[in-house]
Image (tube, rainbow, N blue to C red):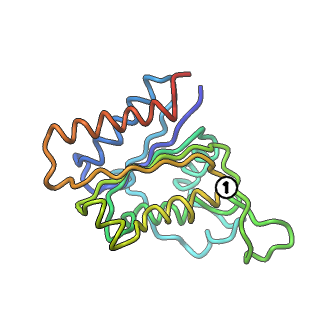
Amino acid sequence: MKNVLVILAHPDGESFNATIAHRCGETLSKNGYEVLFHDLVREGFDPLLPTAEIPAAGPVDPAVDVHCRELVSASGLIVVHPNWWGMPPAVLTGWVDRVIRPGVAYRFLEGDSGEGVPLGLLAGKTALVFNTANTPPEREETDFGDPLDSIWRRCVFGLCGVTTYFRRTFSVVVTSTREEREGWLDEAAETVNRYFPKE
C-alpha cells in the first residue's frame, strides 16, 4: 500500500485548515492510501533547528527522524496551512528546516561544497499545498507577488525532486459562508482524487 504524508500547520485544531487536512486524509484513505498524518502544533513539533542537526551526517532528534523516514517512504505529500505575512506559520518553516534536510530530501553533487544546486532525492514526486487566506487572490498576486508559490514551488519542492506540484488558496475565509467552505472542502477532495486516484 502506498502512503501519503499529510502535514497540518495551524494552532487551532478546530480550524478550517484542520478540516481541510482531515478531508484530504479521508479521501486518501478511501482511495486506498495509508495516511501518515501530522498535526505539528498538537504534536508539539519543535521547529528550532539545533546546530548539531545542520550537517547531513549530524545527529537527528528521534521525533524528527520519524518525519524524515516517513517523508522518504511517502508516495506524495500534502501540506495545509494558512498564509501568514506571505509565509507559512513558524512551526511549518521549522519543519522544513529540520525534515527537508540534506541526505533526506536532497544532496549536493560530489565535489560541490554546498554552493551549487542540490539534487532532489524525494521518491514521492507529487506535492499538494492547500492554503487559507484573508487577502483576496487578486491583491495577493498584484501587491505581494504570491510569495507562497515561490516558497513551495521553487524553493522547497523544486529542489527536492518533486515534479508534480499543485497549490490552491481558499479565500477570503473570514467573510466566507458555510456553503462556500463546504464547496472548498469538496474541491480539496476532488483535487486529492485527481492527483492520488484510487489504487
Q: Is residue 139 left or right of residue 49?
A: left
Disc 1 element: loop
Quarter of the rendering containing residue 85: bottom left
- Mark 1 surroundings: few (<14), some (14-19) or many (≥20) residues within 10 A: some
Placement of 49 over or under 126, stated as above or below? below
Quarter of the rendering containing residue 103: bottom right
Q: Nearer the viewer, residue 123 or 175?
A: 175
Q: Position of residue 48 (x, y in %)?
A: 47, 70
Q: Position of residue 90 (x, y in %)?
A: 39, 67
The quarter of the image holding the C terminus is top right
Total count of labels: 1
Residue depicted at x 33% and y 73%: 143
Which three-letter amino acid code belongs to the residue tagged 1? Val
Placement of 17 over or under 153, stated as above or below? above
Q: Position of residue 142 (x, y in %)?
A: 34, 70
The quarter of the image holding the N terminus is top right
* Residue found at the far right of this picture: 111
Q: Nearer the viewer, residue 132 or 47?
A: 132
Q: Position of residue 57 (x, y in %)?
A: 72, 65
Residue topped by disc 1: 104
